[in-house]
Image: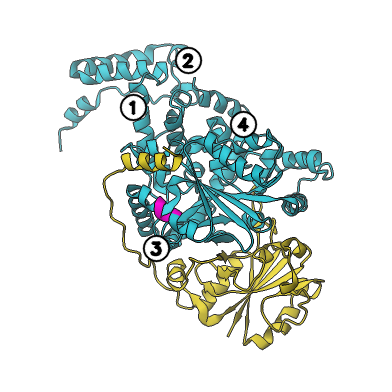
Chain colours: A cyan, B yellow
Amino acid sequence: MSAHAERATLFLLDQPRSAWHDQAVWWVRQKRDRAASALPEWEELRDQASRIKAHALSRLADYLEQFERNAVRLGARVHWARDADEHNRIVHDILAERGVTRLVKSKSMLTEECHLNPYLMSRGIEVVDTDLGERIVQLAKEPPSHIVMPAIHKKKEEIGELFHDKLGTPQGLADPQQLTEAARAHLREKFLAAQAGLTGVNFAIAETGGFVVCTNEGNADLGASLPALHVACMGVEKIVPRAKDLGVFLRLLARSATGQAVTAYSSHFHGPKPGGELHIVIVDNGRSRLLGRDEFRRSLQCIRCGACMNTCPVYRRSGGHSYGVTVPGPIGSVLAPSVDAAKHAGLPFASSLCGSCTDVCPVKIDLHHQLLAWRAELARNGLAPRWKRIGAKAGGFVLRSTLLYRVAGWLARRLVPLLPRALVYSRLNAWGRGRELPEMPRRSFRAEWRRRGKP
Amino acid sequence: MGSREEILARLRAARPAPRELPEARRFGNPAADLRARFAQAVQDAGGRCVRIGGLDSLPAALEELAPYREAHRVASLVPGVTRANVRLEDVVDPHDLRDVDFAVVPGELGIAENGAVWITDRGMRHRVLPWIAQHVALVVADDRLVNDMHEAYECLDVGTGFGCFVSGPSKTADIEQALVIGAHGPRSATVFLVG
């Protein structure tokens, strides 16, 4: 069994909980549907967004240079990091040179991907995640289980217990309003004490040299605007050519993520605040490799809305932690093998290939096609699970020969009904573990076709 | 070779076939009644939209709001707000704004489709003001409403300083999807539509 399947099995042991998780995530998908169907131009927007991103990727180096020129002109400092290590080193150097020991962060999947927090913490810097969901999982010493709702896997009672333990809230408190109020008070202190704020970047604008950060809580703005120092970390793929393009992306992002028309705050940063400093760290970390792959390039169009997770039948029932990567779900299963194919070989198989992810993706990434392409690539490199390899080989052998196919069908129709149930539903039949096989037909489709007379 | 050159070289080496940049354009149809659409969208975003005839009615309209009446410290970037008692030009350190109860901030533009108001830090002195205050009021002229985000970007020059689309108060649904208003920033957002 793959690591994902093993962890998913554990998650599914608690049936009521996994059903609750399924419902909670599906609810978000339904909100997205209502928001999308309220816009008759939805499909046009998706198409436009996809085309803008495809264009930006085809001229990425030029746009990054243009972005850098403009950002520097506005007074920002721009840094470049080949990989996670270099990114962490750069951020640490910026903080260490200025004697920063207290950092507040808003949500950045890139810094999760680079494991920046442990890097800084082991060097004596206090790192506080300020998005409420991220703070919850940070206090629980867990990774986020969803990129938009990091603590979606936790029940309010568990959060109450965690806050009782870490923030001193009364025992048994499980009211979301009161728990949020406690976190607000706790994090206000952290914001006021911080010497630097770190944010992610949702969109970087080549023509202006600025970038946009979207939050509902306002945590990015408190973190970026209270301390004098603001560090913003972005992957190379975050570029859009023109400010006007944001009209398309901001209309799609929140509707796809949570069903809101727009996030509460869409902040546009152009240069440092008066008397402050702004550092922008541009990170590759494997993205240039993906750019060179025709079949996987479009995954770089992702705007991290999480819609593919919310709709995915596998994600909803197995939980974000089962993926074992920063970005879970369909998009995560496409991105992870490009970083370490052997380690994440199970993820492209954690999908029913139903295509729902592709249908909801606001930038039209062909996610289920990419998952299939990864399966082929992993199999070519001997990384597909053994039973799947054997099964696919056997299937290929039979399907290649008309005679073998007919004989196999004939045998199955006659033998399967006679076999004892224990044998048909043996360990080899993974499909039959939670489902009944359809009844064997009396004759083949070909025979039935002939019998009825072709139309 | 430095990291910058190496990354750019890698990206150029991996560069796919050219793809045309589609022309920027508007999508969708304008709302029949921009003001009504805007007011509804502000409400959907968890805020309140109050229409007033002119700026001289603002002080009285503010008095209708309990958080304003009960505020000890009020900072206003809109002139004529009676209870304003924080002299922003004297505040050197933004941390000194920590106990501001109510902030009144002018908005340059309102967007009917999502209730967002465009604010900038021009004249704000400390751009943290609309987030550090416990409650916020945004003041927008009703002839400065546009239909959607496309139109907003056509009207705005976002390329200098700091600007933000503010849609309702600060909020979160991170605990079991329960919507809670007032996550870190303002606990309420009232938009005064003037004109």
Q: Are marks 3 and 1 in contact (CB under 8 Å)?
A: no
The image's mark for residue A376 is 1
- Residue density around tag 1, few if under 14, some if 14–19, many if 20 or more, within 10 Å: some
Report the magenta stretch's main SS: helix
Q: Nearer the viewer, mark 3 or mark 4?
A: 3
* Chain hosting mark 1: A
Residue at the image position 66 percent from the left and 54 percent from the top: A223
Disc 1 residue type (three-letter): Ala
- The residue closer to the viewer here, A311 or A427, is A311
Q: Nearer the viewer, mark 3 or mark 2?
A: 3
Q: Which residue is mark 4?
A: A15
Badge 3 element: loop
Disc 3 residue type (three-letter): Pro
Q: Is residue A330 visible?
A: yes
The image's mark for residue B115 is none
Badge 1 element: helix
Q: Is residue A169 above or below residue B168?
A: above
- Residue density around tag 4, few if under 14, some if 14–19, many if 20 or more, within 10 Å: few
Counting residues from the start of the chain, the first of labels 3 and 1 encountered is 3
Counting residues from the start of the chain, the first of labels 1 and 2 encountered is 1
Disc 2 residue type (three-letter): Arg
Q: Nearer the viewer, mark 3 or mark 1?
A: 1
Measured Cα–Cα span from mark 3 to mark 1: 37 Å
* First to last magenta residue range: A64-68
Q: Nearer the viewer, mark 1 or mark 2?
A: 1
Counting residues from the start of the chain, the first of labels 3 and 2 encountered is 3
Q: Are marks 3 and 4 in contact (CB under 8 Å)?
A: no
Q: In what quadrant of the picture does the C terminus of chain A appear?
A: top left
Measured Cα–Cα span from mark 3 to mark 4: 39 Å
The image's mark for residue A40 is 3
Measured Cα–Cα span from mark 1 to mark 4: 33 Å
